[in-house]
Image (cartoon, helix red, strand yellow):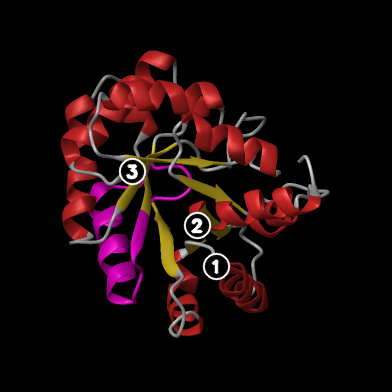
Amino acid sequence: MSNETGGATAATNFAKYIDHTLLTPQATKADISKLCQEAIENNFYAVCVNPSFVRQAVKELSSSKVAVATVIGFPLGANLTDIKIAETQRAISEGAEEIDMVINVGALKSGDVDFVTEEIKAVVKAAKENPVKVIIECDLLSDDEKVIATECCVKAGAAMVKTSTGFVKDGKGATVADIELIKKALAGAKLGIKASAGIRDLAKAKSLVDAGATRLGTSAGVEILKGAEPAKAAY
């Protein structure tokens, strides 16, 4: 950043891109309260929490403009479709406004493209008018498979293609190359792109947005806006 004022302004502008995220298994109610308060204070677009915390997040954010997102079939994507549908319906009934679902990666890699498409479509239907962001888990896919997964999202009526869960061991997380590939694969379709996992500083956030990301999933949103890098990655 070239100067303090310019840097602060650039960082603040990224607040609207950020889904302030806490999906660790050890997260407590107090941690979720802190997440929600930070989201309000920093004007983040949304918080993203596990399904068991949707009701709490909705309550704590009720007087704010911050949206509540939750994850479905997380983190493996290997749940039965009926379970993903039920998870989605329950989350929406408890006030979730956005759904981040994980595809069945094994089905995609097996070449069962119709299954993947129909499962996404089923979750989109269960979510009603609420946006569905589809996690294709780029770290586990070849470039050709990333393109196919993106095409499934388009055919199924999803709102966004999302890069990663952040739970793949030694995964790269969101990369500029993947954002550019997904954007090209969308071929002008009006879907957003959510970059997630490994976004720890403003420079990385800016590079992903410049490449075409329309949303950023990160646990380091506060640090990004301050222009500081956290000591340890949480998501």
Q: Is residue 116 visible?
A: no
Is residue 156 rendered to the left or right of residue 99? Answer: left
Q: Earlier in the sequence, mark 2 or mark 1?
A: 2
Give the alpha-carbon distance from disc 2 to disc 1, as whole Å.
Answer: 7 Å
Which residue is found at the position 78% from the left and 40% from the top? 2
Q: Is residue 74 magenta?
A: yes
Tell me the amino acid under the disc marked 1: Asn
Q: Which residue is mark 1?
A: 43
The x and y percentages for residue 218 are: 59, 50
What residue do we see at 71% from left, 54% from top? 8
Nearest the eye: 46 or 212: 212
- Up-down: is 92 above or below 202? below
Q: Which residue is mark 3?
A: 160
State the extent of the magenta-drawn residues as a range.
73-99
Of the numbered discs 1 and 3, the one sitting upstream in the chain is 1
Q: Position of residue 61 (x, y in %)?
A: 48, 79
Q: Residue at x 34, y 36 (%)?
A: 104
The x, y position of residue 59, in whole percent, is 45, 84
The magenta stretch spans residue 46: no
* First-in-chain label (3 vs 2): 2
Type of residue at label 2?
Answer: Lys
